[in-house]
Image (spheres, grey):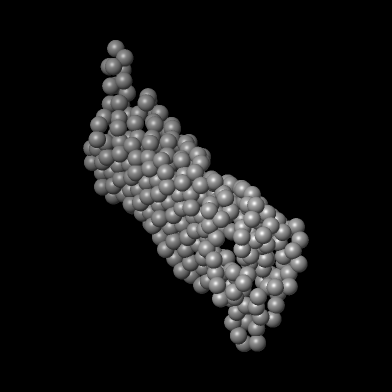
Amino acid sequence: MLKQAFVGILAAASFSGHVNADEYKFTIGAFYASSDSTMLVKSAKDTNSYYLLDFEDDLLLTEDQFLPFFEFTYSFNDRHNIYLDWKSLHRNADTPQLGFDIEIPEFGDNDDNFLIDGEAKISTTLNIDILRLGYGYDIWEGDNYTVGASIGLHTMFVETVFEGNIGLCESRSDPNALCDTATFTPRIVDNALTAPLPDVGVYGSYEFYPGWVFNAHAQYFAIKYDNVKGSLVDIRAGVQAIICENWHLSLAYNYYDVDVDIEQSRSILDTEFRTFDYNINYSFTGPMFAVSYSF
């Protein structure tokens, strides 16, 4: 009796890869991320040298952790889909001693840099939130498969906070000069960045057994406009299973990588000087688990 009821549920719910009427789908879950975050900073000893500061190796931020995510999908008119999802990665750590002095830029119009004392304790916070909004169209549909294309926008909200023995390098006639006269005092440097990156992608679903669906998507984009350039890669593949009517369990593997670079310069006596160079790269790789409800 229980077996017959379960088979009936599968028959009624299949195929979940596409719908013939409007459908709303809410998904909540968690992913186990192995993160790699870097930031390009200026050497305090050599005006022509830059150092790739690693938040995990140099600043001791946690590399592996469980993180939450949320997704919403609205499917309508048989082939059209609107999706919205959000991921969050917030971390902080204390570093007893960095081992080398670095200059970091301050966001704003005053062209000031800050000099971090590599011999003193530093506290670091790196908060990253990723919001994705997009539209997908099912190009090919069959009894047990769907293949489509999508366009969307990934918006990355990044906050970097450094707290410790930090000196202020005020605006100078030569921005490329060494900052060797700064007075170190307890200070907090809080920079926030919003990086919107459009994307194009493909996705597909294949029901290989009643109630069991293989899903995958791949999204990519690279842009260079004025003084901003960036790129992103978002790939996910996994399996979704029906547990009861309207409820699904999903297990997937995700690879995500985004790179944002912002440069700024100003003219002094008809000479262009680079005053601001902010580059941050963030990637995570790991499994994802989620529960979905659709109606």
Q: Position of residue 102 (x, y in %)?
A: 62, 65
Q: Is residue 5 above or below residue 22?
A: above
Q: Is residue 81 above or below residue 173?
A: above
Q: Quadrant of the N terminus?
A: top left
Residue at 68% x, 62% y is: 117
Q: Position of residue 101 (x, y in %)?
A: 63, 65
29 sits to left or right of 241 = right
Q: Position of residue 9 (x, y in %)?
A: 32, 23
In the picture as drawn, the residue positioned furthest to the top comes out as: 1
- The picture quadrant where one finds residue 213 is top left
191 sits to left or right of 13 = right
Say whether residue 96 is visible.
yes
Q: Nearer the viewer, residue 166 or 254?
A: 166
Residue at 34% x, 31% y is: 241
- The picture quadrant where one finds residue 245 is top left
271 sits to left or right of 13 = right
Residue at 76% x, 67% y is: 183
223 sits to left or right of 47 = left
- What is the number of callouts on the image? 0
Q: Nearer the viewer, residue 217 or 268?
A: 268
